[in-house]
Amino acid sequence: MAQDIYTLSGTLKEGQGNTALAGAVIRIKNTNAVAVTKEDGSFQLKTSASLPLTVQVSSLGYASQEFVITNKNAPVILSLNVQNAYASLVVVTASRVPENILKSPVSIEKLSLSAIKEAAAPSFYDALENLKGVQLTTSSITFKVPNTRGFNIPNNFRFVQLVDGVDIQAATLGVSLGNSIGPTELDVENVEITPGAASALYGMNAINGMANISTKNPFKYPGLSVYQKTGVNHVDGIDRNASVLSETAIRYAHVFNQKWAFKINAGYTRATDWVSNTQTDQNPNNLSTANPLYPQLNGTNNAAYDGWNKYGDENNNAVTVTGINYNGPNKSFIVRRTGYWEKDLSNPTVENIKFDLALHHKFSTKTELSYSYRFGQMDGIFQRGNKIQLDNATVQNHKLEFKSGSFTARTYLSFENTGNSYNIKPLADNLDLTHLSNNAWRDRFRNAFQTSINNGDDLAVAANLARKAADAGRVEPGTTAFEQLKNTIIGINNWDHANSGIAGAPATGGAWLNQRSRMYHTDLLWDLTDKVKVFHLLVGADYRLYEVIPDGNNFVDFSRAAADRNKSLADGSFGKPVQYTKYGAFVQATKTFFDNRLKLVSSLRVDNNPEFSPKFNPRIALVYSAAQKHHIRASFQNGFRFPALFEAISFVNNGNVRRVGGLSYINEGLGYLDNSYTLSSVNEFNAAVNRDVATGLTANNAALKNRAILQVTSLQPTRPERINSFEVGYKSVLLDNKLVIDLDLYTNIYDGFLGQVEVAVPENNTVQVGSDAAVIAMLASNRARQTRYRVYTNAKNQYHNYGGALGLIYSLPKGFVISGNLNYNNISENRQRDVFVTGFNTPKWLTNVSLRNREFIRHTGFNIVWKWQDAFNWESPLANGRIAAFNTIDIQFTREIPELKTTIKLGGSNILNHRYIQYAAGPTIGALYYLAITFDTGFKPKS
């Protein structure tokens, strides 16, 4: 017999208060009876279900809950508590096992799938900058570099980036190229970042942090997705005309019989790059490497000008113009070649092509085998010691992975090819050298300079006229001759030039960056908790082999004689591949005490590289949870970083300066470690010599008089960097789940910090430093008797840096959320000068604040983010200077169209177009406005 229909009436409120909750869905379990609460929170449900019955209540931003109703006549008063999405996040990267983010033993940040969709950023990768403790540096519009806790550089060897467990670095470049080789927006499930050292579990290089990008499994995310983003940058027309950015991506995944599944992704991006054109002079006339005795040459009249974004005007292109009669006889002036601006040497248009596929097979619910292939091709600017124009650079990898319960085995191989890329520095050098050698250019300058002075011109006018005379006939940007010579140079993989006096060098020199490598990697992970029972036990091991194909210019076969290393063999090769190996293993034990309130985590890792002794990396951490709301953690870990390929085994000539890796065998017969002078002392020495020559001394006598200024280098072979890292932190969710507090404090001690120092070896290592012959060889006029090296070596000092970060998230009524973070990083100054400048390169203060609502209008959400960072000093081998403070505003609006399974995202980054730079010689970044449309057959509306 049918039950009578009756009406169940009630009110829904928020938490323990009296605020009505509108728009919530009320459903009687196991029936079709559904209602939506009104503005006053009231609802009515018509049903014939017999009592007692269960009511299911859900609302966006609140924890879903079930209530049992026993009386149909009494008014029903229900309440929902605010759901804090952060408190429910599960992370893996911190301990390599799933755990709640509140109980992670070290600092960790996560960008979830929902956060990616709602980010006020052009892409998920740009959104990493909004995470606590993360600094994102833009090298190119296609290439951004993350870093945490200081010592930032555009080629960040100390930060590791994984995609589904695969290190996606370009091996010879030493870094991951942003997300240019990574997944498209459509295939990212989440991103986890561990600020600070992670090498205790992940091995070499991860001492400044790690990003772990997880993609969507086709079993879990089948269907078709299409993404189109169209944007515009250079809106002010200052650097370039307003330009269109276009990014297209497609993803398709399918499941067969619940046993087989595959996915395929493709993406293409095309844009006009940001422009690096800052004209800051980093060699002002008051320095000893310029002409401080002649204030007439200050400012724009500096004859030794070295612009941030000009190349060919560096120290190796300085000439000393002697014998000038100006207010007395025999005056000397330091003058640098004119060089070329980066904007005239780089390509404005950049492209990025991505493709990946994966095939998965499930043997059972717990056992899965998968194969994946990933390919990325990119253009853009990459900065190492110099700027490199990447052109059709590719990285591709093949991965085979087996998972069965608590055991995972993974192996992959990666291929790198830099394509048609070229180095901007030798390009500029060789454009000028094709016109005239440095000596010939110097002589032209001297003659014109003296003539102008004799005609009564003041010093600044005379120097400018002399430069024009010396440059007469060189190719100029915008001409056919310039483009033809440029294209010739970038097609030659030999950076020497005939006009530098190098036998057999090309008449035009070269600039092509022809680097190819292979990387083979295998790792195992086994959770043995079920075997030991008493505590959680995790063990792992990995092996990696790099194989670099010698090109005779950047990388060589060191088994060949030094004079033959850049000469091709009969088969066209430059010798045998150079191998570089690393392997390691770790064990981690986790034990909880006092009803799971205290968690103790300890691990020990050992890594070995045959070039060094084995290195041990311990980590110990504890987490104490009080009342399940307050989580306090402390940790100590020790980590090492083996030199990257370029730091270890490079052997490249660049502007008459040989860049060499730090391994000891490279130094054999060359003398740069123990028979050289530091370049900084050579510069000071020549400035003193010039002053004495002006008083009437001969150059040789002045050199011998000032010999004490020269500093012998006395370098040791490179050893791995070491870090000792201490961290404490606190996380809590308070005020009825409305407030999240996340605080961490850290201090690091770096030992053996790796960097570059430039040295000069006298007379091709045939005389000893300290001898008269060695001293006289250091005269600027005797440049041909010096062999210059830029050597990767370890700092002699220890470096202490420290800081902290505070993150807050507060849930407001009606789905509004305000959040922000404040980050502080600093370094203690050392009293003793080191052999090179380490470059902390990090603002003391960095903050961002956001206000968002996933659905402030039905199917419509927004997010607005304000960012600010403090001014700071930037130091690097390429450029040095002060980086101004800046702030930006990013905003996005998201509109869902459920009936079309489509989401529209309209937004902008730096919407007020506050032009800024992030590092010395970096690009000027302006506004980017965009519209993105996503179609997804697996579309799930927010409510």
Image (spheres, rainbow, N blue to C red):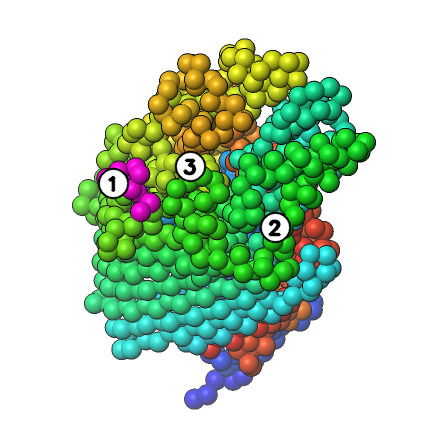
Q: Between disc 3 and disc 1, whose residue precedes?
A: 1
The residue wearing badge 2 is 474
On screen, residue 301 above or below 922: above
Question: Which secondary structure dominates the residues rendered in magenta?
Answer: loop
Q: Between disc 1 and disc 2, whose residue precedes?
A: 2
On screen, residue 462 above or below 109: above
Identify the amino acid type marked 2: Arg
Task: Estimate the x, y position of residue 871 in percent, counting from the top left.
Answer: 66, 37
| Residue 351 visible in the snapshot | yes
Count residues near mark 2 (Cα–Cα under 10 Å), then give few for <14, some for 14-19, many for 20+: some
Which residues are the magenta region? 558-567
Task: Estimate the x, y position of residue 126 in percent, counting from the top left.
Answer: 55, 55
The residue wearing badge 3 is 658
On screen, residue 245 above or below 582: below
Q: CA distance from mark 2 to mark 3?
A: 26 Å
Identify the amino acid type marked 3: Arg
Closer to the camera in the image, 41 or 355: 355
The residue wearing badge 1 is 560
Closer to the camera in the image, 673 or 76: 673
Residue at 44% from the left image edge and 61% from the top image edge:
392
Closer to the camera in the image, 443 or 238: 443
Q: CA distance from mark 1 to mark 2?
A: 38 Å
Q: Between disc 2 and disc 3, whose residue precedes?
A: 2
Q: Residue furthest right?
A: 456
Identify the amino acid type marked 1: Arg
Q: Quadrant of residue 61?
A: bottom right
